[in-house]
Amino acid sequence: MDDRPPIKVSVAYASETLQKLIELDVPAGTRVREAIATSEMAAFFPEVDFELAAKGIFGVRCDNDRVLEAGDRVEIYRPLVTDAKEARRRRAKKD
């Protein structure tokens, strides 16, 4: 059994219409996938496959098996609808 105290982390996801940031106390050694499952984010966004979605910690991509540290914010990313370069070109044409 692990005698380390729990750590505080958060899990964040935003759809086009709803944003959720869920703060959790999890056991030390918790991995990204476990924190997402514990957050029950799927109850708010049942259409999202959180196992396959891209993830990061404070904007730095990571995988499902990364072990979390106290204070980490797990960010779950939506797929891009438009290529960023193409979006800039469209905006430039409008100006």
Image (cartoon, grey):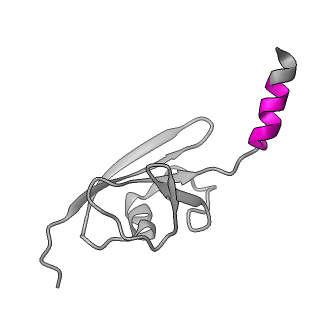
Measuring from the top left, give residue 27's x and y in whole percent.
24, 69
What residue sits 50% from the left and 39% below the top? 19
- What residue is at 63 percent from the left and 50 percent from the top? 78
Quadrant showing the N terminus: bottom left
Q: Is residue 57 above or below residue 20?
A: below
Q: Quadrant of residue 48?
A: bottom right
Q: As drawn, which residue projects farthest toward the top?
A: 95
For this orientation, the residue located farthest to the bottom is 1
- Give residue 61's position: percent from left, percent from top: 53, 59
In the displayed structure, 25 sits above or below 15; it is: below
Q: Quadrant of residue 86?
A: top right
| Magenta-tinted stretch | 82-91
Q: Is residue 28 left or right of residue 60?
A: left
Q: Is residue 83 magenta?
A: yes
Horizontal arrangement in the rendering, residue 87 relative to residue 52 (left or right): right
Looking at the image, which is closer to me, 60 or 37? 60
Instruction: Residue at the far right: name it.
Output: 93
Residue 17 counted in the magenta span:
no
Q: Residue at x 79, y 34 (%)?
A: 87
Q: Quadrant of the C terminus?
A: top right
Magenta span: predominant SS is helix
Q: Is residue 87 above or below residue 30?
A: above
The one of 84 and 27 positioned closer to us in this rendering = 84
